[in-house]
Amino acid sequence: MFQRAQSQRRDSFICIILLFYMIYSAAVGRTPFEIFFSLYVVGAFFLGLVTSPSTFHFFTTRLSILIWITAVIGVSINSVVEMPWAGTSFIVNDVVTVTSRVWEDFGVSRLAGFARSSDNAANQIAITAVALLCLTTSVISFAGVATISTYVIYLTTSKGPLLAFLICVVMAACYHWLRFAHKPRHFKLLTLVLGLTAIIIMILLPLFPATALNQLNSFLGGVGNTTNSFKVRLTEMWPNAFLLVELDQNPIEYIFGRGIGGIGAVQFVGRYLHPNSADNLFVFLYVSVGLFALPLLTMLLLSLARTQPQMPAISAAVALMLLYTLIACITNGGLETIVIAFVLGYGMSAQRN
């Protein structure tokens, strides 16, 4: 009864905050289209917030297998054959949507397979693989899922998801070893430390001074194409995202942000002067909701400590899936990526489980 009342209070608080930001967003100049389209794009996050433990149990134990197999096959085939639907687009209310994006990153082809983009495919494979790694009790199955997933994520050329996944593979191995050694608390401590580290890096990287960014850009210049997209984020995307707040010339936005629809996907469906995808969860949240981004990130971190050990394998899977999203979101907007947004939403509501 107490947990139900606590959950209802939390849900009421979220509804009040959402209503406030819808009103605030309209007050600072966001149009109804921007507000409602942005809420639609991040709908998976709200779905995660209201998902029941039994539903998430189904997603983690069964649906993850289907998603993982489909994404692995899709990207593998796409590495040698172009999908017949690649680049297909359709229009809904004057908004163009591409079903499987065809694009290159500094001359390197990005593979999507059955997903909308290469990043989406990589995240789907990584998140579902993390769950499978925690649930398997076979060394051969563990090694097989880890090896196949690493190679296929590599094929997508998505470097952030690959790094985040490799860290989670090590953590999954630690989970099994610590479980065997009867030291589950050590695993939770490790996830908290890594989660905190990811959030600190997520916040500090975009806040580097311009001189430091230029020096880092010069240093990375000789590394090759593998770091070009990261350099663009450091020197262009993230500074330009913060510049959106400055260009509005509204001091209150430094505290409360530009509001819902102030940054992200909505800027690419209209004729905006400064479109920005904000590929960093802190940047996306700060530009959208201002300083409220900090308690939101804190809630996500605390969710790692609230995963309960009644079902150890499921609990570890929830923790590592959430940890993966926090690491990946250093170079990913997060809330506008369906599977990441869903896990972030569920992770934030983990205290009720």
Image (spheres, helix red, strand yellow):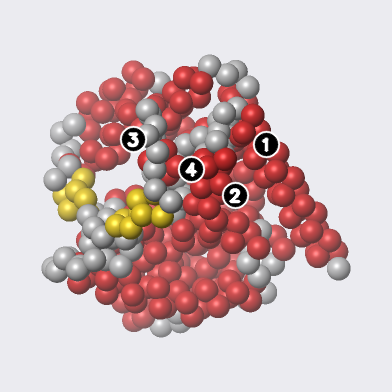
Q: Position of residue 74 (x, y in %)?
A: 27, 71
Mark 4, secondary structure of its residue: helix
- Foreground pick, 312 / 245: 245
Answer with mark 2 or mark 3, whichever residue precedes in sequence: 3
Task: Count residues near mark 1 (Cα–Cα under 10 Å), then give few for <14, some for 14-19, many for 20+.
Answer: some
| Amino acid of disc 4 | Leu
- Residue at numbered disc 1: 23
Question: Where 152 falls versus 90 (above or below)?
Answer: below
Answer with mark 4 or mark 2, whichever residue precedes in sequence: 4
Mark 2, secondary structure of its residue: helix
> Does the CB distance between marks 3 and 4 fall below 8 Å?
no
Question: Where 64 falls versus 345 (above or below)?
Answer: below
Residue at 44% across / 23% down in the picture? 243
- Residue at numbered disc 2: 301
- Residue at numbered disc 4: 281
Label 1 to label 2: alpha-carbon separation: 28 Å
Answer with mark 1 or mark 3, whichever residue precedes in sequence: 1
Is residue 138 in view?
yes
- Foreground pick, 94 / 244: 94
| Amino acid of disc 1 | Ile
Q: Position of residue 263 (x, y in %)?
A: 47, 36
- Residue at numbered disc 3: 233
Residue at 26% across / 28% down in the picture? 217
Left or right relative to 34: residue 149: left
- Foreground pick, 245 / 53: 245
